[in-house]
Image (cartoon, rainbow, N blue to C red):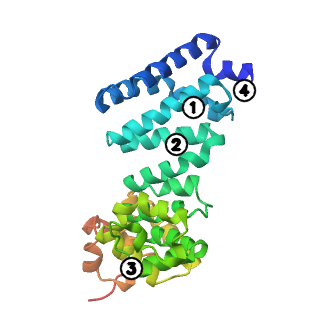
Amino acid sequence: MKNEQVIEILGPDWEKATEIILKYHKEIINELDKQPTLPQVIYLDKVINNLKFIFNMASDINVDLEETDWGKAVLDIFSISAKKFKEAHKYTDSLELLLLIYLANPSNKTAIKYDIAEMCVELGRHFIFEEYFHDTTDLELLMAGTLSAIMEGDEEEARVYFERLREEHRDVALFFKKDFHLTNNIKRTIPKTLKNNDEFFNMLMRYKEYFQSEHFYSVLRYFAKNPVNIRKIKEEKEKIQRQKMEMYRFLQSLGINRSDYAWNLVNFGIGTKDDFKNYTKKEVLSIDGIGPKTIAKLEEAGIEFKEV
């Protein structure tokens, strides 16, 4: 890292700043196993709030913090903090730190991506996969994308991830097609075709509790038994998104500035203005957010409803 880059990140008094960082790091390492988790988390929270700007600056000017001793110290502080936050069940904070490390430490992305994936599953943050791992063929990341989407309740998106997993790792998809309730001896559960697949075994170990859940078990087994065309799923999702935006613009033209009303109409089956004629007023009134005033505005705009 060049001197001018260091100055841009830490400021003109960069030498003093590096001393403070290294002092923080030494104190954290020395106290790592000497205090309970909660006091450590409180202290680490104060430290990282003073250092977050470093990650943003390093990411903005595209430098790798691994190139300097103080940069390595910052990365280690944040890695330790992410681990401690996870132990304290502060999963959102842990994920935030992991993503900062991922962006500011390009030389070490492989080592941290599975930790990010695990937190995304815990929190149901599958949108992060689209941002960071959208083109992955990695078995564990594809499975984590599937599980995180199921966790969030978006089974369509979960289906997309699972079908990508089926394309890249067919034997793994077939594993979920059978009765895959895991026993204490996981090795005995694994079929012969996957016995020597360390990547698969590590994935099973990391997400064992999810696979043992009845809900996840049922969804994965259904996906495995009922393959679909990913392209059709994506086309259908894009069609629904277009309909929601068009319906929202239509409602706005009536003075109804509520995107949730548009979402509810499309989810009910009314994707275009012409679709109203397939439903009675009573049926449309049953949609959440749609009341007599909205019906009146729709009729003034020339919308026709199905006769009783």
Q: Which residue is mark 3?
A: 276
Mark 3 → mark 2, Cα distance in angstroms: 45 Å
Q: Nearer the viewer, mark 4 or mark 3?
A: 4
| Residue type pointed to by label 3 | Phe
What crowding class fits label 3: few (fewer than 14 Cα within 10 Å), some (14-19), or many (20 or more)?
many
Would you say residue 296 is visible in this rendering? no
Residue beneath disc 4: 1
Which residue is drawn at the image coordinates 48% and 60% (left, top)?
A: 202
Question: Compared with residue 149, is residue 41 higher up or lower down, i.e. above or below?
Answer: above
Q: Position of residue 270 (x, y in %)?
A: 40, 76
Element class at badge 4: loop
3D distance between C-alphas at marks 4 and 2: 21 Å
Image coords of residue 94 (percent x, y)? 42, 41
First reached walking from the N terminus: tag 1 or tag 4? 4
- The answer to whether 23 appears left or right of 258 in the picture is right
- Density class for disc 2 (Cα within 10 Å; few <14, some 14-19, many ≥20) is some
